[in-house]
Every structure is written in structure tokens, then in C-alpha cells.
Image: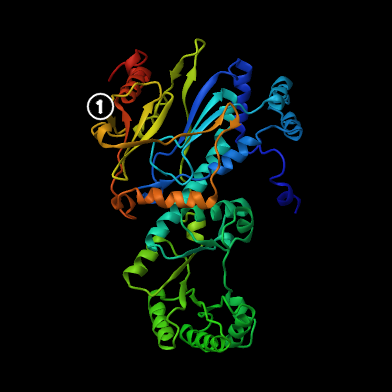
Amino acid sequence: MKITKDLYKGSLALLTDFYQLTMAYAYWKSGKGEQEAVFNLFFRKHPFQGGFTLAAGLDYIVDYCKNFKFSEGDIGYLATMKGKDGLPVFAKGFLDYLRDMKFSCDIDAVEEGTVVFPNTPLVRVKGPLIQCQLLETPLLNSINFQSLIATKAARINIAAQGEPILEFGLRRAQGIDGGLAASRAAYIGGCTSTSNVMAGKLFGIPVSGTHAHSWIMSFETEIEAFEAYADAFPDQSIFLVDTYDTINGIKNAITVGNALRSKGKEMAGIRIDSGDLAYYSNVAREMLDEAGFPDAKIVASNDLDEHIITSLKGQEASINVWGVGTKLVTAFDQPALGGVYKLSAIRDGNGNWVPKIKLSQQSLKINIPGLHTVKRYFSKGKAIADMIYLESQELNPHAALIIDPNDPTRRKRMMPAYYQEEILLKPIFKKGKLIYKLPTLVEIRERVQNQLNSLDKTHKRLVNPHLYPIGLEENLHHLRMELVLKSKPSYNGNESEK
């Protein structure tokens, strides 16, 4: 099909929401297009009611920004758009501006595989207002989904207690790119392999798979199917045993396993895809051990997630390998992360940064103003708190106070003499030029494990995790409250107090 063949060739500048372009046009028309601004990408709540989130998707952002340009085809399409008055939506001068525009922003971001927390910036974009605005949708598209799936995979990995997890959700994924991005993020989060062959080719992820029930059903008998599969793959035979009767399927797998052994080969294991997984895995383990196959793996599948795996672990199921599909790649119990992208500062005519605040009836949705960044504190190798602070602000060298942005009564004093520190936002682009060396997928995956190891186990609980301390440095907290009070109508005289 032409659409799938050509989808990712050429410019992706139109992979955005229409209102980004209408705002860009209005900025241009009002003369604000080149005014320098700062936007932050962050989220407000952890997904899955968890205690941590993994940042993922930066590689996609780098690729997008390196190639950010409006093609002649893009300009031609925008020129065809008409308003309700029948006139072009966009003036020719604006379209010429887009055609000639070169990406020139600074981008700082937490590295892929970093454990992150609510309200802290994952990506900070600084540059011309139009460019910053046009990057909102593609950045959110990449970060939101891949961070969500990587986090889900990490939770499943925690539940599986380090046992191999095979990701095979492509058939249930949301389209081609949804499947590819999910496979990449799942591998980052801890899955050991994917069934997605294209993801294997594009990203270098190990590929694995066995066979389906249709393979068994295409033969006259189950044992004939096992024999034919063993003949084709004598060194990696895993037999799906629940097509007709699970117990009989295990017996047939043992029979074929013995035939393989007579040829100097070993049966790799069996897979159970239905029924009572705890019961049948324990029966299978007993049968396999008695037959002399103690090393044969038992693979389980069938709509697994971290909660079902935890339950099966609690029942002492004899499962060695976990096949996870739908509930991983679709983030079944929470289909979106909910990351947002907000303006936090704009440079005035004198070159000064003016902090910007966005108010809401919900305090959770009040943004953090100014040109800020985030620092993580460690003690004895464990992450103990994150501090959001203004880059221009001189910090207390003896003890910085951090204040929870959603609950000012939650405060923590950070003593530099007792802690180690790390700035989490790393320079990625400088004036449009890539200055960051992208890590390999294996390195990102290793970073995930190191990051999770740095968290106390209470923050990694799947249910009711302990709250990790995140706070605004006290000067930033005071600035935020000052701007909130100044901006509220009841405090500036536009509305009488009640």
C-alpha cells in the first residue's frame, strides 16, 4: 500500500495538531515569532498508580528535530487550506517563512531510561516561539507513549523477579508505529525479546517466538505437529501444549522430547496459553522432571500483566518465562501517560527572562514558572529526592529546602555535605545542532536497571508505593506563589473578594 510505503519518507513537519500551525501563524503575524521562549514537557501523575516512571522516546525526538523542515509538499498542502470566508488560512509570507525556517532551538532532556517523577521537566525546549510551539505535539507523541510502555514493562519485569519476558503484542498494538515504538520501549523497560521482526531489524532487539495453535491444527494429530516442528527446529523446540488437552499435550511434548534426545538434541520447553496457569504449570513441571527434563522451560502466556504475574508467583506457579502481549503494548489499564508541554518563560526586549504562570481551579495543573532544571540527590547510592530550581538562582550552599509543589507542608532539607548530586537535564541540541551522543538501546536498557536499583524498594511497590520526595527549591516556590497571587483576579482588583 502506498500509504505505508511512503508514510515516514521525507518531512514529518505536518505531524502536528492544526492549532499549533494557527498559533504559529498568529505569532508570525503579531511579530512574536522569533521571540525567545522556554517550554517544559512533564507529567503530573505516575501511570498505573505506581511510584515511578521511565523516560523513553528521546531517540525519536532527536531524529525528528534533526530532520525538522517543511517540504515543498507541506507548503503546497498548507496553501490549499481555506477559511470560512473562502480565503487562504495562511498568508504567502508565512508559508515562505516556514519554507525557509531552520531548526535552531536548544533542547535539554533527561536521558532515556532515567527514572522520573511528576512535575519535573523531562524535556526543556528553548528557542524562537514559533519553533518551540511547533515541537509540542511531536515531542509529546514520542515521550508520552514510549515512557508509558517502558514503565509498564519495568513493572512487569519487577513482578517476574528477573525471569525472561517475551514481548509479543504486535497483533494487538495500535497500528504499525504503535507496534514498533511499543517493542522498542518494552525492551528498554526490561523485556528480553520481541516477536516483532521489524523491530528486531530496526532496533537490534532479540527476536523470539514459537508456534501458534494453527500449526497444531494443520496436522492430523498433535504429536505429528510436534514432530514436524522438532524436525524444523531441533535446537529451539518449545511446544504449545494446550490446543486440545493440556495434560495430553505435555505427554506428547515429552515423547517428542525423548526422540530429540536420541538425536543428540534437547527439547527447549513447553508453552501454556490458556486455563489455570498455576495448576497446569505445576503439573507440567512435575511431569517434565519425572521424565528427565528438569531444564525444560515452561512458558506462560494469556493476557498477562504485572498483577496476574504477581498472583501466579504467590501461587508458586512453575513458570520460567513470561509471554506478555496485549496488556503491555496497549498499556491496557491506562492507555495514556498524560504528559503536557507548557510555556514557563519568555525573553523580553531587554534580554531578561520573564517567568510565566498558568493557573487552574485545580492546583495540580498550575505550572512551574521560569527557566528551571532538576537536580537529583543521592545518599549511599540511593536516590533520595529531586529538586526543581531556577538556573539563575544561587542556591544555599549549606542546606537547600525543597517544597512539594502540590502540598507546601511537605518539605525536606537537603544537606550537600551528606549527599551526592546529579543534574538530570542534559544538553541535547545547542542552537539546532546535535551535541549529545546517543546511547545504544542496550546501554539505555542497562541504565534502566541501574536507575531502578537506585530507588528504594518501597517506591517500586506495584500497589500503594511510597511517595518519592520531589520539591521546588524555596525561592522557586516563593516565585510561583507570588505569580499565582498576582495573577488571580481576586488579588489584583478585577474581582471583589467574597
Which quadrant of the figure has residue 206? Answer: bottom right
Amino acid carrying label 1: it is His
Disc 1 crowd rating (10 Å Cα; few below 14, some 14-19, many 20+) is few
* Residue shown at 58% from the left, 43% from the top: 60
Q: Quadrant of the C terminus?
A: top left
Left/right placement of residue 457 relative to residue 153 reads: left
Q: Position of residue 153 (x, y in %)?
A: 45, 56
Q: Position of residue 147 (x, y in %)?
A: 48, 47
Residues 49 and 316: in front is 316
Can residue 368 be seen in this snapshot?
yes
Q: Position of residue 344 (x, y in %)?
A: 45, 25
* Residue shown at 71% from the left, 25% from the top: 100
* Residue shown at 71% from the left, 51% from the top: 4
Q: Which residue, as the protein is rendered here, is positioned at the far top?
A: 350
Which quadrant of the figure has residue 362? Answer: top left
* Residue shown at 50% from the left, 45% from the top: 56
Disc 1 target residue = 398
Left/right placement of residue 498 relative to residue 130 reads: left
Up/down of 56 relative to 473, above or below: below
Can residue 149 be seen in this snapshot?
no
Q: Quadrant of the N terminus?
A: bottom right
Identify the element where label 1 is drawn: loop
Q: Position of residue 242 (x, y in %)?
A: 50, 79
Which quadrant of the figure has residue 158? Answer: bottom left
